[in-house]
Amino acid sequence: MNDGDARRVAATAARTSYGRLLAMVAARSRDIAAAEDALAEAFRTALEVWPERGIPDKPDAWLLTAARHRLSHAYRHDLTRGAAQPVLELLADERQSRGEAADDFPDERLKLMFICAHPAIDEAARTPLMLQTILGLDAALIASAFLIAPSAMGQRLSRAKAKIRDAGIAFAVPGRDELPDRLSAVLFAVYAAYGAAWEDLNGADPKRQGLAEEAIYLARLLVSLMPEEPEARGLLALLLYCEARVLARRTPDGAFVPLAEQDAKLWSRALIIEAENHLTLAARRGVFGRFQTEAAIQSVHVQRGVTGVANHQALMALYDLLVSQEPSTGALVSRAAAYAEALGPERGLALLDELRPEPIQTYQPYWAARAHLLAELGRSQQAAHAFDRAIALTEDQAVRNFLLEKKRACSGCDWSHV
Amino acid sequence: MQYMLIFKEMQAQFDERNDPAKAGAYWGAWSTYIAAMNEAGVVVSGNGLQGPHTATTVRVRDGKRHVEDGPFADTKEQLGGYVIIETPNLDTALDWAARSPSAVYASVEVRPVMPPMSGAQTG
């Protein structure tokens, strides 16, 4: 046994089981921050102990026991501070569950997600809190996804955790009457988690590895919990449509391939069929929300694999619907691009010009779309400026190369004019 | 856990308390609500309070006592009463808060009661 093996097993456990373990530790105490500390300590101990004594048969169970032990020790310590009641409850709980098999892992993550989505929690903290606790994303990554400073995000998260710990929010999946209100925040967190994985095209960021699979897993879990809820199915369909196209987003040598140029033969038929089924089942309920609409947009895109042509009319109608449901900057920029495809670049550009100035300053897709439309219109000087903005805002090397290539092609056509 | 439900009232409700035409309905709503909580066995303690016109606020600054007429914050919603209840979690406490008369026309603040401080002497 060597350090490398222990490190590898611990890293796998951290990636695949973090949220599951955290939810189980926090389920007892409701103290998410303490559970995070206890779990971090358990991982640290594992890296010391495993190389000497060997990796346990069930690393997850080992980590869980270590974290719980650590936590109950910390709570016993608290006795001296007079907080006797919760400790006694905790110890009783521990005794009761000692008989529970070590590999019996009920998924407590759904409960934890619904706690994070509780109306008593600051609305702005709900989705970030879920991303951190359920999927183990760090505050800096979450802050960048929500366009705020990491320190502000850290504060928001710790305030929310203190509220959960001290206010005694019930650790349970809410009843039928409250479920719909809380569901939208839960669905949005799963959507944002998949989005964070999607942006990392290369899978280069170790923090985001396995995130797409986890998001799809959680979406499936939500559908099994609420089979009648059309938006949960809509979200699952959306993620499956996207996942179906993952392999086609890159050439074998790693270059970026935009959707319109993707080879439909590389799309996963099995995932598309599964997505279609979920979308059809969702649509039967006759209640349409943004996730079903986004899934329907993806459905139109993948139809190109069968028909060979993109249905621009359908896309325009669906983007109109999406903007009426969720007038986000992302939806508005995508709608402008869809209009440009169907009705010409002037129309798309006019829609981009209508957008409010501040959210688009640092929104890469806006500048990329604007650059393409200006290039098509032959306004190469303005296009070059927009390309530069888009390139500066791009984190992914392959996307940057793609944009640089487009910019070069555009100024080439400019020279042919002179 | 124990929670304090802090009931706010508007001036209109303080007026209703002594309006012969409205007092019956006002007190009826409150006594039914309190009776329901008592029946459920959740009440630890509680009281209604006289109106904000009876309030006096005291501050001590640089050793000097400042006494003022009126409540500590002059807002539309004023403290009308409180009750401490014992429930398994916040959600159940919020359910009780939502059933109160003032939840409809003003608001109810729900706060967990602190556990007893260490070293606190009783008796």
Image: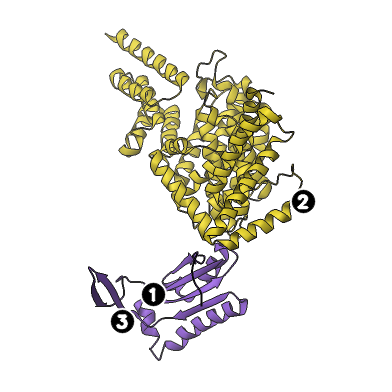
Q: CA distance from mark 1 to mark 2?
A: 50 Å
**Quarter occupied by residue A323:** top left
Q: Which scheme is used to colour this image of the protein?
A: by chain
For disc 1, the neighbor class at 10 Å (few under 14, some 14 to 19, many from 20) is many
- Read off the chain for label 1: B
Q: Are marks 1 and 2 on the same chain?
A: no
Instruction: State the quadrant of the C terminus of chain A.
Output: top left
Among the chains pictured, the one given yellow colouring is A
**Quarter occupied by residue B53:** bottom left
Secondary element at image label 2: loop
Q: Are marks 3 and 1 on the same chain?
A: yes
User: What's the residue type where badge 2 is placed?
Assistant: Gly
- Above/below status of B35 relative to A377: below
**Residues at discs 2 and 3 in contact (Cβ within 8 Å):** no
Q: Are marks 2 and 3 on the same chain?
A: no
Q: Which mark is residue B53?
A: 3
- Read off the chain for label 2: A
Among the chains pictured, the one given purple colouring is B
- Above/below status of B52 relative to A354: below
